[in-house]
Amino acid sequence: MAYRLTRTWSDPRMQKLADWTREMMDAVGATAVLIGCSREAVIAQAALESAWGARAIGHNIFGIKADASWKGARQTVRTREELPNGDGTFRSVMIDAEFRDYPSFAESVADHFAFLRDNGRYAAAGVFNAGSDQAYFEALQHAGYASDPHYAVSLMKMVESVKLFTVWMVDDAAPGTSAQAPVPPPGYVVTDSGNVMRADIGQSRIVKASDTATKVTVAASAAGVVAAPVAAVAGMSWQMIAALAGLVLAGALAFAIWKLVQIRAARLDMHEKEVV
């Protein structure tokens, strides 16, 4: 496990929440990188949806149901649903529903990411290029993830609660340790250099780079530009970039001087013809 707590709590409930949060910190790493938000943001959503894991069905912390397409394990649970009456009103009833059952929190988080990825409205709302926790939560709300009109506000408050525990955690997977990197969500791979990219060769592109090329790569991908060459340039040292910039400026200056010489020659020629 990469993360560990550096303190304990005398209150058993607080210690339980802290232990759950620490386990979630290990589980949400790859998804947080792909979304571009903090680990605490993903944990906050899981905590809000499952009451800090207390209402989770197995490791299903996002309450995703098992439809006909789900081939994994499932659990039948009595749950409350709001059903339409046909006249614009709803009635609250208890029904038996089947939910996906995951062997670990990491797989639950990965499947939740796949759910967001495979439903186009989340990408359209900006979930995957939000760039901050606040923007990510607002994109979720805009896409209709929850009916609560204050969903984003509730999530931001939950982030602060999560940080009460994460501030007491250290990452044992820091550079120089042997801890393993988190398993990427379905359809993605982590390269040897630490980049996260699509596993499908036909759609291969860097989704999240591990170096200074990150922002340029993501921006180029979003604009439909070939990401690899741009990332290669962005990953150069500042000395190399400065040299290239100097060459470009020198070329532009030489072209401008040549153009001015042509214009001056043309004017002199016209003046001589007028004198004659």
Image (spheres, rainbow, N blue to C red):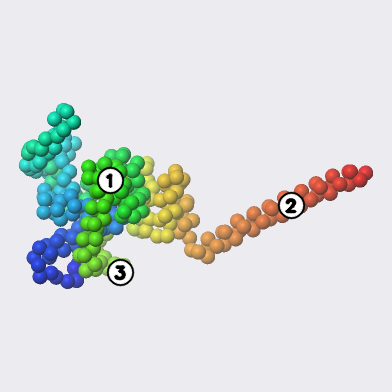
Q: Which residue is mark 1?
A: 141
Q: Nearer the viewer, residue 262 or 131?
A: 131
Q: Which badge, 2 or 3, is on the more N-terminal residue?
A: 3
Q: Identify the element where label 2 is drawn.
A: helix
From the viewer's perspective, tell me whether residue 129 is left or right of residue 186: right
**Label 1 close to label 3 by CB (< 8 Å):** no
Q: How many marks?
A: 3
Quadrant in the picture for the C terminus: top right
Query: Which residue sits at x=10%, y=38%?
Result: 92
Residue 96 rendering spot, x and y as whole percentages: 7, 38
Q: Residues within 10 Å of mark 1 (few under 14, many from 20)?
A: many
Q: Identify the element where label 3 is drawn.
A: loop
Residue 243 rendering spot, x and y as whole percentages: 57, 62
Q: Nearer the viewer, residue 108 or 229?
A: 108
Foreground label between 2 and 3: 2
How far apart are the two marked residues, 2 and 1, measured between alpha carbons? 57 Å
| Amino acid type shown at disc 2 | Leu
Q: Which residue is mark 2?
A: 260
Q: Which badge, 1 or 3, is on the more N-terminal residue?
A: 1
Q: Which residue is mark 3?
A: 176
